[in-house]
Amino acid sequence: MSLFKKKSSAKSYDKDTQKPVIKASICNGEQVAGFKDLHTGKFEEVMLICSAADLDDFRVMYGITEEITKEY
């Protein structure tokens, strides 16, 4: 049992070639946050979004201040 939490450092992504995106399912409403490659269109999953707190955690984790687009 650990009494002290390790402070998580901010992660980064390549802002020139990737953009933050939320992929949402039309069928069941599941949402996954990640990054879409602007050149290839390939989506890299980072985390499942179950609540607004999860989305806030994703923003803080990667230092995202701009609007995150949602794709279906």
Image (cartoon, rainbow, N blue to C red):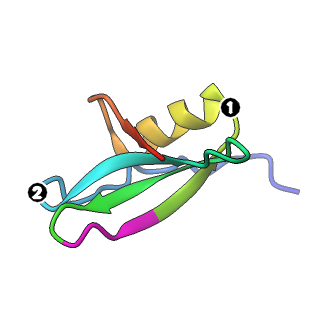
The residue at 17%/53% (across/down) is 15
Range covered by the magenta-colored residues: 40-44
Q: Which mark is residue 16?
A: 2
Residue drawn at (49%, 42%), measured in percent from left and top? 58
Q: Quadrant of the N terminus?
A: bottom right
Is 42 on the left or on the right of 47, as rendered?
A: left
Q: Please tell me whether residue 42 belongs to the stretch shown in magenta.
A: yes
What kind of element bears circle 2? loop
Q: Residues within 10 Å of mark 1 (few under 14, many from 20)?
A: few
Mark 1 residue element: loop
Q: The disc labelled 2 sits on which kind of residue?
A: Asp
Q: Depth check: 15 or 22 in front?
A: 22
Relative placement, left or right, of 16 versus 58 is left
Q: Pointers 2 and 1 in contact (CB under 8 A)?
A: no
Q: Residue at x 15, y 62 (%)?
A: 17
Q: Which mark is residue 51?
A: 1
- Answer with the quarter of the image where residue 13 lies: bottom left
Prevailing secondary structure class for the magenta stretch in the rendered image: loop
State the mark number for residue 28: none
Q: Position of residue 37 (x, y in %)?
A: 25, 65
- Residue 10 location, x and y as percent? 38, 48
x 33%, y 47%: residue: 20
